[in-house]
Image: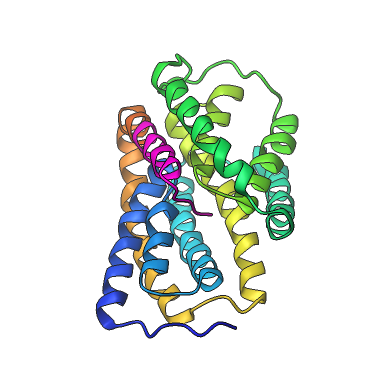
Amino acid sequence: MELVTAITPEAYLLLTAVAFVAGFISSIAGAGGMLTLPALLWVGIPPLDALGTNKFQSVFGTLSSALNFFQKGHLDLRPIWSGLLAAMAGSALGVWAVTQLGGEQLRTLLPILLIGLALYFAFSPRISDVDMRPRMSNGWFNLLVGGGIGFYGGFFGPGMGSFYALAFAALLGYNMRRATAHTKPLVLATNATAMVIFMLGGHLLWGLALAMSAAQFVGARLGSNMVITRGVVLVKPVIILVTIAMAVHLLLGGGTR
């Protein structure tokens, strides 16, 4: 395994603070990895160890917001159980695929998809605080969306939470508070599967991962509370801004998983 550059106390504090902010943002719109992974790489952590540590700490942020939504009655796991299994299978397949194929073509296409997503959130009447008529059954949704976006999450990753939220709103007619809540278990299943694969490969810095996880947990709790109280007024503009920022970041040559 590649040796890790010594991490200074200042870098620990910086990465922990970044994890807190990322947890807050991810609980609303996803994409916290756009902050944490570049920061992990910037302090000199080798890429695979950075990916494993990033997945570990992000799982705890997603778990925090999922528990908060569940405890406050905004999350019902019963309709999405099969989607969780599909997301796990898709994620494992995606991790395998990216190690075999690489993700350069998807990296080129993704900014266009993200800009399209932002435009949909900006102008679609289905993005609201009111439930709409569903366009797809739960069974097909769990299989196609859970498995498909799960594969994407394991293969590449940026914007996964926003894609799940869009699917819940556009295909099942969920209002934005409900859609945001129901993305969390699927993102959790996707990232936890990838995390386990990285852990089995020994690509995890335990001390740093635990410190960042604690900060993610607190930030996600605060962010999910804001989603519950403010709904589409908060979620819609944050998702639009985050997806445009991700598109610009990727167009300028950045990228993350």
Residue 77 visible in image:
no
When asked about the image quadrant of residue 2, the answer is: bottom right
Residue 194, given in percent of the width and then of the height, sits at 63, 61
Instruction: Name the residue rendered at 46%, 16% in the picture.
Output: 124
Instruction: Name the residue rendered at 56%, 23% in the picture.
Output: 170
Residue 198, given in percent of the width and then of the height, sits at 62, 70
Instruction: Name the residue rendered at 40%, 68% in the picture.
Output: 40
**Extent of the magenta region:** 239-257
Instruction: Name the residue rendered at 68%, 55% in the picture.
Output: 98
Left or right, residue 117 beside residue 20: right
Asked whether residue 243 is drawn in magenta, I would say yes
Q: Is residue 14 above or below residue 119?
A: below
Q: Is residue 240 above or below residue 245?
A: above
Left or right, residue 37 beside residue 82: left
Residue 93, given in percent of the width and then of the height, sits at 74, 54
Asked whether residue 223 is drawn in magenta, I would say no
Residue 115, given in percent of the width and then of the height, sits at 45, 29
> How many marks are shown on the rendered structure?
0
Q: Is residue 95 above or below residue 108?
A: below
Magenta region, main secondary structure: helix
Instruction: State the residue in front, 182 or 237.
Output: 237
Left or right, residue 216 beside residue 109: left
Residue 9 visible in image:
yes
Quarter holding the N terminus is bottom right
> How was this image coloured?
rainbow
